[in-house]
Image (cartoon, rainbow, N blue to C red):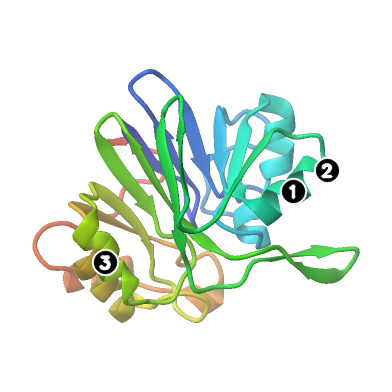
Amino acid sequence: MKATFHGHAVVSLETEDGTKLLFDPFIDGNDACDLDVNTVEADYILVTHAHSDHLGDTIEIAQRTKAKIITTVEVADYLSSFDLETHGMQPGGAHTFDFGEVKFTPAIHGSSIEIDGKPHTLGLASGILVTADAKTVYHVGDTALYSDMKLIGDLLDIDLAFIPIGDNFTMGPEDASLAAKWLRAKKIVPIHYNTFPLIEQNPDDYIKMLHEDIGFIPEIGKPFDV
């Protein structure tokens, strides 16, 4: 399996059989992103929560590609009103798709969307675990540090984790370094930083906080092996 970081919290995975998974496709308005809403490919779109910098361009991409959207039940119900194919889940739940297994985890964070100028809450924020090609990838989503991350790390063999470090809205580098220790992933990639002034961080400083040689900062848009 190949993984690619596209800036902010946008991540893509491609399995050995060519299935393309796209996480939190905030592309328009994301200066760090290398993708184009009009050309990006996806068989599945996975959305951690409803905030605009994560739900992003999901509707436009799914309308064009006919990708199935995997997200929480509340966000799935909202997206279904646009005549899109969805699969709703909740934290703690797992489901096997044709490419592998998806499991949703808790995330301590909000999940709302603005409709007609007013905020509407759409369920719970989440993290997403994907197991395919005998590898497990964890998109932690937007979250604070919480102690069950240690339990997740104890129970699962995580090959790659994408962890937010931006602070203010999510974990900052110090808490994110503890999250990395608890999750015990073989590789750690920091996400959700430097997109806006409030979440400016030096990712190199974060990498230095991690134990052993597990953290790295991939080049935007360049695939790497999981």
**Of the residues under marks 3 and 1, which one precedes in the sequence?**
1
Residue type beneath disc 1:
Asp
The residue sitting at 25% across, 73% down in the picture is 177
Outermost residue toward the left?
A: 212
The N terminus is located in which quarter? top left
Residue 204 in sight in this render: no
Residue tagged 2: 81
Report if the CB atoms under discs 2 and 3 are less than 8 Å apart: no
Q: Earlier in the sequence, mark 2 or mark 3?
A: 2
Q: Are marks 3 and 1 in contact (CB under 8 Å)?
A: no
**Label 1 vs label 2: CA separation?**
7 Å
User: Residue at left 74%, top 31%?
Assistant: 63
- Residue at which label 3 appears: 151
Q: Which of the pair 103/12 is nearer the observer?
A: 103
Q: Seen in the image, is 84 located left or right of residue 110?
A: right
SS under mark 3: helix
Nearer to me, 107 or 94:
94
Find residue 115 and name its label: none
Task: Identify the secondary structure beneath mark 1.
Answer: helix
Q: CA distance from mark 3 to mark 1?
A: 30 Å
Most distant residue in the top direction: 17
Determine whether label 1 and label 2 are within 8 Å by CB: yes
Relative to 225, does residue 205 appear above or below in the rendering? below
Q: Can the viewer see residue 196 in this picture?
A: yes
* Left/right of residue 8 with respect to residue 53 in the rendered view: left
User: In the drawing, what numbered circle is on residue 77?
Assistant: 1
- Measured from the top left, where is residue 138 in percent x and y? 36, 51
Q: CA distance from mark 2 to mark 3?
A: 37 Å
Q: Residues within 10 Å of mark 2 (few under 14, many from 20)?
A: few
Mark 2 falls on what kind of element? loop
Binning the other alpha carbons within 10 Å of mark 3 as few (below 14), some (14 to 19) or many (20 upward) gives: few
Residue 140 point in image, percent of width and height: 41, 59
